[in-house]
Amino acid sequence: MKAKERKILLVEDETVMREALRDWLTEGGYHVDVAEDGEEALEKIKGKEFGVIVLDLKLPGIDGLQVFEEAKEFRPAAKGVIVTAYPSKETLEQAKRLGLLDYLPKPFKVEDLEKIIIGALGELEREEMGEEHIWLSLGAVSYRLCDHNYECEHCAFAQDIQATFGTIALIGEDEVAKLRQLPGSQRLCRHKRYIW
């Protein structure tokens, strides 16, 4: 399944925030479902799979952390992100223990949330493909699929290949935006190395 075909569940009790995020992500090509509280979110999660669950920390009834913890019982592979206007060290640590991908304090840039979503959807796609598909051999050159959304400064592979083999940039910055729109299975790494 292509990354953008996966549904995103947005759980936010504040109407303006929920609708703004839903509209922004929908315009970006994502399939977005929404819930106003934890109970509604859990019912939706029980009924279908979501690529990413974006949860407000403070929700009526059960909070976002509790929702994610319960969701993991019947969706162990669930990927989640907490957004909150009330960040604290305690809830951050709890989010880490539960395996949430990130913890974004409000206000945040929607672009930052989308980067997290893209990374999560790419991770799901790679899990389905298996590690054997990470490398592609084309003639005498070995290419790797990008798994860091072309943010090479955060990629251990890019740093390692620069230190070990030297780097040849396959594309310039102007092309990165186009590549980011491709499904993870088509995102060639911008670095290549020769097979000896």
Image: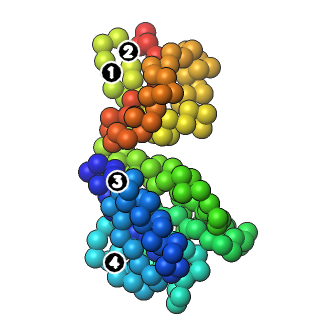
Q: Position of residue 96 (x, y in %)?
A: 61, 64
- The residue to which callout 3 is attached is 29
Q: CA distance from mark 2 to mark 4?
A: 46 Å
Between circles 2 and 4, the one closer to the viewer is: 4
Quadrant where the C terminus sits is: top left
Residue 183 position by quadrant: top left
- The residue to which callout 1 is attached is 137
Residue at image position (73%, 69%) is: 89
Label 3 residue SS = loop
Decide which of tag 2 and tag 3 comes sooner along the chain: 3
Q: CA distance from mark 1 to mark 2?
A: 6 Å
Residue at image position (54%, 83%) is: 59
Q: Is residue 187 visible?
A: yes
Tell me: residue 83, above or below residue 35: above
Q: CA distance from mark 3 to mark 4?
A: 21 Å
Residue at image position (55%, 28%) is: 158
Which residue type carries mark 2?
A: Val
Counting every numbered tag in the picture gives 4
Decide which of tag 3 and tag 4 comes sooner along the chain: 3
Q: CB under 8 Å between callouts 1 and 2?
A: yes
- The residue to which callout 2 is attached is 141
Q: Position of residue 86 (x, y in %)?
A: 68, 74
Q: CB under 8 Å between callouts 3 and 4?
A: no
Crowding at mark 4 (Cα within 10 Å: few <14, some 14-19, many 20+): some
Which residue type carries mark 1?
A: Ser
Decide which of tag 3 and tag 1 comes sooner along the chain: 3
- The residue to which callout 4 is attached is 44
Residue 52 position by quadrant: bottom left
